Every structure is written in C-alpha cells, then in structure tokens.
Image (cartoon, rainbow, N blue to C red):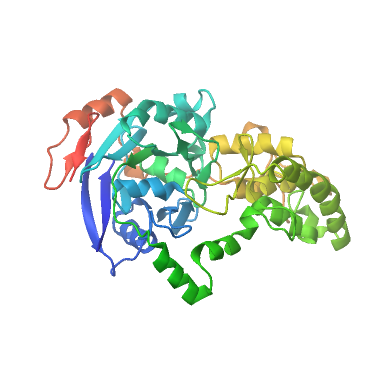
C-alpha cells in the first residue's frame, strides 16, 4: 500500500505524482515533515483512515515550517478531509511561488486523472467585495469554479492577514447543495495561511471529485476492535468522548465555549491579564457576575437551549459547532476578544471576532496583544499608538512590542520582477515543455496521471 503525493511547483507550473510506501511513513504528519525538510513545501493531507467510519478520521492536516514559530508545525481542521479523500490522494505538497496570487483548482472525476489548474486572481480586490476578506474570497472561488464539480467541493481560503503578518490562518466551510454554509473551520495555528499565500502565492484552494476508494466501512469489525480496547462499541465510545463538545449535563451547557467558561471560576483571565494580580475572591466574583450571569447566560439561551449546533462537515455525533446565526461560538476567540479584552457581551464580542475572522488573524494570540491596558492604568506613560491607532498592550516591566513583519521571500526572490495577472497567465500558457510524468499548469486545464 502506497501513499500518493501530488507535488505542485507553483512557480514553474510543473507537477507530478510520487508514491511513498506505508511503513516508511504512516500519515500526514511524518510524511509532511519529510516533504517539508526535503522541499520546503506546504503540505495538505489526510490520514490513512480518511473517509472511513472512524470518528475524527476526516480531519485535514496542513503541515510545513511555520513562519510564525520558525519550526515544523502541524495545523488541522475538522471535516475538510472528507472531500479531500475524493481526490484519491493522501497529500498535496506545494513548492515554489506563483508569479501572482492564484487559485489552485484540483478535481478528479471517476478515472485516475487529477485535473490541476492555477488561475491568477486580484485577491485584494476580491477581499474588498461583499462579505469581505476570507468570506468574499470563498464566494468568488465557488462562483468561478464550483459548476465544474459533480459533487459539492471544499474551499481553503486566506485573508489579508496572510499578506501582512506571520500568523495568517486558513479557513474552510462545508458546501451544502452548492451553497457555502456558516460553519467555518480553521487551520488557524502556526501561520499556515501566511505560508500558503506569502511564500507560495496561493490565495485559495478548491478541491473535490467523485473518486471512490475502498474506505474502511465494516462497523462490525470496528465494534469488535473498540469492545476489545474500551469495552464499548464505536458509537458508544464516541458519544462518551465527545460529551463536552455536544452537551454536558453536569454543567447544563456544551461546546468549548460553554464548558470552559462554566468551569473557569477563579482561573478566569480578563482585562489583558490584569486579573492575575487580583485576589481569588475578586476573580470568582467577576466570573460569576459578568461571565456566568451574562456572557455565558446569553450563549446558553441563544445557542444551547434551541440546539443551534452543526458538524464540521463529516458525520459526527459531537455536533461541536455551536451557532447563533452566522456566528460560530468557540472558547478561544470569544475569550481572546471577550473577557481578555474586557468585553463580556455577546453582541460586542461577535463584531470583534467577525472582524478578525474576516482578515483571518490567529484569534487566540491576537486578543492577548489587543487588551485594554496601554500602561497608563498603572501610572505609566501610555504606549504610542500602533497601526490604525491601536495601542500595544503593556504587560510586565517591558510591555509588549509590535511583532515585526514577516518577510516571506528571500532576498533573491524579492529582487525578481513581479508579474501582473495577464503576464502570469500568458507565461503559464506558453512556458516550458512537459517532462516525464509532469505537465505544465496553464489557464486551460491539464491532467496528471
């Protein structure tokens, strides 16, 4: 049994299939480490059980050397691997940088051929349309490419933060009957959106297909394995393991937002970490008055009681995506842009989280650097205003310093002439002859064996 990797050079337009035996590598993490070390690639892949009945087997993994942490990093999102499995691939590895920001389109229809297309996009103009940011880009990509898929595809998109920071993430949402849903999922850690766009020139990826492989579907065998290990069948063990994410009767709430805030108590961190200097009694009183009696109460009344909950796109008993309309409620962003910023109201937090989501910032870190304390609250001179009038938070003696902008390209790449979209498209169409097992990626579709 082999793992199939599609290697795509976004700069030259060549791609090829390479196979790695199971045993030498076992999944998207160790294979991703090998590919990143050998090629400096960004890798998008799934595990060997993708498409199977095992809960959680359909996560999509994004790996590579992080522009944020400077080491090998693994970020993943739920559900997106289910559609990826229809490509008949285990991993897509992207090397090189496209001459202009582009959309990578991958599709497979029945046979053994994967169609690969790179099309330039005026990403800044698209980001400024309609829903703006990553949401506008997903709208554009679905409208532009969606009709060529026989089944619902999946889109990975980046936002403006991926051009201007080292912590841009990647967003995706399930597509149901040809329409984008509101259940966004994120590969938000490690700055993989920055790596995808700034280092490889790929603003978005759309993929899907009708390829059918022999996924593990024998529930009788799976139940036997789980009963031997856990004394429970697969579904029973899954229900037990996901109690927190679905609904925990011990706390009369559910999801990471509900359970984490219900159990925070005196461990609540608020007002840009200043509560660490408060007495335990003060933190308990603050948690009860502002979180439990208002912030959490709003969430329970608007989301938990009416059961506004969804999955990430795969069949799953957890239904962990807690919703209020278009807003998905997770603990990390609603803590970072909630209590940590001195905000204890759902309406205010929703606006701030949505604004950061649109630009695709890593929310759980951004909140720490955008607290309310600019230094003047403790008798210190206020810190100078940062970009767009935002002040950087002062914590400890030295205070926080603005993160330097990440240079995604090496000096020799920075000196290379930049091509506009028309020049890039023309070069793709006429440039280079095909090599053995390879084909140029052009504006017109090509097929890889």
- Spot the residue most to the front: 220
Whole-percent x and y of residue 40? 33, 53
Whole-percent x and y of residue 249? 72, 58
Q: Which is nearer the eye, 311 or 376?
A: 311
Q: Does 200 appear above or below 428?
A: below
Residue 268 visible in the picture: no
Question: How many numbered dots are placed on residues in this image?
Answer: 0
Whole-percent x and y of residue 426? 22, 26
Residue under the image location 17 percent in, 46 percent down:
449
Instruction: Describe residue 240's horizontal placement relative to residue 394 as left or right.
Output: left
Whole-percent x and y of residue 130? 53, 23
Q: Does 223 appear above or below 413?
A: below
Quarter of the image where the N terminus is located: bottom left
Residue under the image location 20 percent in, 29 percent down:
429
Instruction: Describe residue 169's horizontal placement relative to residue 152 as left or right.
Output: right
Q: Does 3 appear above or below 293?
A: below
Residue under the image location 29 percent in, 58 percent down:
38
Q: Which is nearer the eye, 130 or 252?
A: 252
In which image quadrant can residue 238 be found? bottom right
Instruction: Describe residue 421's horizontal placement relative to residue 166 as left or right.
Output: left
In which image quadrant can residue 201 be found? top left
Residue 278 visible in the picture: yes
In which image quadrant can residue 294 be found? top right
Residue under the image location 70 percent in, 56 percent down:
260
- Spot the residue most to the bottom: 228
């Amino acid at each position: 049994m082999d793992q199939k990797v599609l290697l795509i050079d976004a700069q030259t337009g060549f791609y090829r299939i390479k196979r790695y035996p199971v045993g030498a590598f076992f999944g998207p993490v160790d294979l991703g480490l090998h590919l990143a070390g050998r090629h400096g690639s960004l890798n998008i892949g799934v595990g060997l059980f993708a498409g199977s009945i095992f809960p959680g087997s359909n996560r999509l993994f994004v790996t590579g050397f992080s522009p944020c942490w400077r080491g090998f990093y693994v970020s993943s999102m739920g559900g997106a691997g289910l559609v990826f499995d229809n490509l008949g691939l285990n991993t897509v590895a992207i090397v090189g940088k496209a001459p202009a920001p582009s959309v990578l389109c991958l599709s497979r229809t029945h046979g053994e051929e994967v169609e690969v297309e790179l099309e330039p996009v005026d990403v800044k103009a698209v980001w400024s349309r309609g829903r703006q940011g990553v949401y506008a880009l997903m709208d554009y990509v679905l409208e532009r490419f969606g009709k060529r898929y026989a089944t619902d595809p999946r889109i990975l998109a980046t936002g403006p933060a991926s051009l201007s920071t080292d912590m841009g993430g990647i967003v995706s949402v399930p597509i149901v009957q040809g329409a984008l849903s509101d259940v966004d999922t994120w590969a938000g850690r490690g700055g993989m959106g920055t790596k995808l766009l700034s280092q490889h020139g790929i603003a978005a990826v759309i993929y899907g297909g009708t390829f059918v492989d022999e996924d593990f579907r024998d529930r009788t065998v799976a139940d036997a394995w789980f009963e031997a290990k856990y004394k429970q069948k697969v579904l029973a063990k899954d229900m037990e393991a996901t109690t927190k994410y679905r609904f925990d009767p011990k706390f009369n709430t559910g999801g990471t937002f509900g359970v984490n805030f219900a159990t925070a108590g005196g461990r609540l961190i608020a007002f840009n970490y200043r509560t660490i200097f408060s007495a335990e009694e003060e933190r308990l009183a603050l948690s009860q008055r502002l979180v439990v009696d208002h912030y959490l109460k709003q969430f329970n009344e608007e989301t938990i009681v009416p059961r506004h909950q969804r999955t990430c796109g795969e069949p799953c008993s957890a239904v962990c995506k807690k919703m209020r309309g278009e807003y998905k409620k997770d603990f990390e962003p609603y803590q970072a842009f909630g209590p940590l910023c001195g905000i204890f109201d759902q309406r205010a937090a929703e606006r701030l989280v949505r604004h950061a989501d649109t630009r695709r910032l890593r929310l759980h870190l951004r909140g720490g650097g955008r607290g309310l304390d600019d230094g003047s609250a403790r008798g210190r001179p206020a810190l100078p205003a940062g970009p767009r009038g935002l002040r950087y938070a002062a914590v400890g003696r030295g205070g926080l310093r603005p993160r330097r902008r990440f240079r995604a390209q090496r000096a020799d790449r920075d000196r290379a002439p930049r091509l506009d979209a028309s020049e890039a498209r023309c070069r793709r169409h006429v440039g280079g002859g095909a090599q053995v097992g390879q084909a140029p990626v052009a504006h017109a579709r090509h097929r890889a064996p």
